Amino acid sequence: MTTTPFLTLESVCWQLPDGELLFSDLNETFDARPTGLVGRNGAGKSVLARLLAGHLQPTHGRCLRSGPAAYLPQQVDASPTDSVADLAGMGEALAALQRIEAGSSDVADFETLDERWQLRAQLQAELEQMELRGVSADTPACQLSGGQRMRVALAGAFLSEADFLILDEPSNHLDAQGRRLLREQLRRWPRGLLVVSHDRELLGDMQRIVELSPLGLRSHGGNYEFHAARRAEEKALATRTLQQSRHERRRGEQLLREQRERLERRSARGNRQAADSNQAPILLGGQKQRAQASAGKAHLQQQAQREQLDEQVRLAAAQVDDPAPVVLLPAAFTAAAPERIARLDKVALPFVEGPLAAIDLLLRRGERLALTGRNGSGKSVLLKVLAGRLQPLHGTVETSAPHAWLDQHLALPVPRATAMAQLLHANPSMAEAELRTRLALLGLDAERVRQPVETLSGGERMKLALACALYAQPSAQLLLLDEPANHLDLEAMQALEAMLRDWPGTLLVAAHDEAFLHGIGITGRLHAAANGWRRLPS
């Protein structure tokens, strides 16, 4: 294993099955610095991560590696027969160790184990380091939650002897504690590290940020905050350059018009003088041919100058890469919200054990509460009970205003329908032209609104789900959101933050992303603590 880990892209292209190029001519080297890979959904970050890991081969170009790379996908799946050891990528090695301990002398077992005699103890120590108490190598993977499976997979990756660790959205399914443990482990990782992520706290620990966009790869030294500042400067410069190019084109076109008018006046004057003169026809014909040739040459020169001015504007516009702003129109509440929006009185939550099963809660108008706590503590159950999707075991649930619940999977009211059909279902009295305008302001153009919702990206589905809630009849005055930022890219997340920050209603939001909670302006927390639910300041 080399002491200088690297991953290098040389003129790498990736072509989609329909022939479209997802990206082309990528040239970059990832060195030992912990690096974050960012970009919009659909830009090809996951494909690029798999190419770098060697799980895919580029359509053109090549990827070079200093040594083996360990790759962890966004979703850690397990078959019904998988154990924790299998999930950690160590099932075969531990099985070989067990056979050797039972007396096997098979050379294949020794080669599989590769002298990792302490592997079982190392895995158990790593599981405990990830606070997976009571979990061992033999535990069936099917008994674990999504967050626990991700922690097991991370434990296996940290025990690998790879030169490079490549993680694709590793914090998506982790609670706040899991995210803290992940960051601590990554700080201790001694070799190359590439993290595909939209988690701004995690990206804040990186020493370099690389952005994948239609313009290719753009690299900045420093963490995400530094990258965002440099990116804003580059965007401002590109915008100024585009404005200057457009100004120069307008000025150039004006000069060309004035030049053309002078030539036309000169030609008309020459024609009048020739008509009044007594020159021979052969001389007049020669003068006419020379004038036409001169005019043709001037026309070609002007055409070339126009094309040059247009090209300058096209090149400047290509560097802006600026998505259209997302606009959510103000909610049209049919009546003022009551002071008490929702109340839980002596409620026992289903599927929740221990002190967290019991809750009393009063939500007042305008409150914006973050619902926090460990995975499995009952946050999603509480939201479903408030939304009327689950009935409490006992107690009283009252909601005094229209409300909407957005689950983690962004389920919409009409399965497999188009975006327009979803919004018409939510508000059948609104004119279709008005609905189209509102969807367009959210970034869903005429083509996208006619497509089934399953073809939309996570960010587009989130915007549509919010539109169905806030443009409904009546409009929701209480939003119950379950991990709304999961699977959104940074731009979509920031757009969501802006929409929620400006929305005047009441919010109860389950989320582990502290940067997101700060961005939407929470006023307090409802925290799932070990001894029960607790109201805390923001």
Image (cartoon, helix red, strand yellow):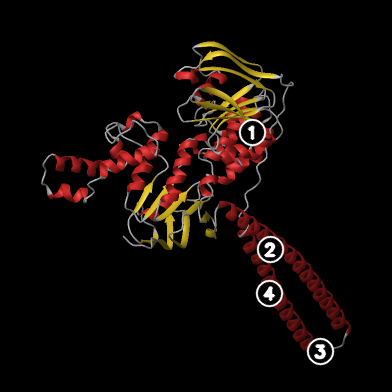
Nearer the observer: mark 1 or 2; the answer is: 1
* Position above or below: 36 against 261: above
Distance from Cα at disc 4 to Cα at disc 3: 31 Å
Residue topped by disc 4: 300
Q: Mark 3 and mark 4 in contact (Cβ < 8 Å)? A: no
Q: Is residue 17 something one can see in this rendering?
A: no
Q: Amino acid at mark 4?
A: Leu
Nearer the observer: mark 3 or 2; the answer is: 2
Q: Which residue is pictured at 45% across the width and 45% down the height?
A: 184
> Callout 4: helix, strand or loop?
helix
Q: Amino acid at mark 1?
A: Ile
Distance from Cα at disc 4 to Cα at disc 2: 27 Å
Q: Mark 2 and mark 3 in contact (Cβ < 8 Å)? A: no
The image shows residue 423 at horizontal and vertical percentages of 61, 29
Distance from Cα at disc 1 to Cα at disc 3: 92 Å
Residue topped by disc 2: 241
Residue topped by disc 1: 522
Nearer the observer: mark 1 or 3; the answer is: 1
Label 4 vs 2, first from the N-terminus: 2
- Residue 280 circle label: 3
Distance from Cα at disc 1 to Cα at disc 2: 38 Å
Distance from Cα at disc 3 to Cα at disc 2: 56 Å
Q: Quadrant of residue 496?
A: top right
Q: Mark 3 and mark 1 in contact (Cβ < 8 Å)? A: no
Q: Is residue 243 something one can see in this rendering?
A: yes
Label 3 vs 2, first from the N-terminus: 2
The image shows residue 501 at horizontal and vertical percentages of 67, 36
- Tell me the crowding category of disc 1: few under 14, some 14 to 19, or many 20 or more residues within 10 angstroms, Cα based: some
Viewer-closest of 474 and 508: 508
Label 4 vs 3, first from the N-terminus: 3
Q: Is residue 279 left or right of residue 337?
A: right
